[in-house]
Image (cartoon, grey):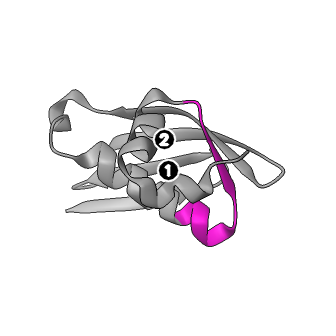
Amino acid sequence: MLDFHHDEQAHQYQVSQDGQRVGLIDYRLADQVATFTHTETDLSVQGQGIAGKLTQFALDDVRSRGWRLVPRCPYTRSFVERHQEYADLLAD
C-alpha cells in the first residue's frame, strides 16, 4: 500500500510503501510559488507508476494551497506537458 505525505519542514513530498520511503519530490517555496527541483524513486519500485502518482499527489496539493508551480525538475515538466489539467498551475 502506498502512503503519500507532505513534509513541509523538509520541503518534500514523499511516498512510502510498507513503511519504507520509496520516492520523493524536493521543492523550494517563495511567494506562493513552488519550484519542483528533483523527483526520485527507489530502483526497487521504478516502472510501477509511483513517480506519476506522487507527482499527481503533489500537484493536487499545490492547487489546494493556491500555490503556483515552476517545474525545474525534468520529470515534473514532462508530467505537466502530458497532463494538461495541471497547466493552469504554471507560474508565468
Dot 1 falls on a residue whose secondary structure is strand
Dot 2 falls on a residue whose secondary structure is strand
Lateral position of residue 3 relative to residue 37, left or right = left
Quarter of the image with the N terminus is bottom left
Disc 1: which residue: 13
Name the amino acid, label 1.
Answer: Tyr
Of the image marks 2 and 1, the number of the one nearer the N terminus: 1
Q: Residue at x 21, y 46 (%)?
A: 49
Region rendered in magenta: 61-72
Q: Residue at x 73, y 49 (%)?
A: 33
Lateral position of residue 10 relative to residue 78, left or right = right
The tag on residue 44 is: none
Q: Residues within 10 Å of mark 2 (few under 14, many from 20)?
A: many
Tags 2 and 1 in contact by the CB under 8 Å rule?
yes
Residue 80 shown in magenta: no
Disc 2: which residue: 25
| 57 is higher (above) or lower (below) than 64 | above
Quarter of the image with the C terminus is top right
Q: Residue at x 59, y 58 (%)?
A: 88
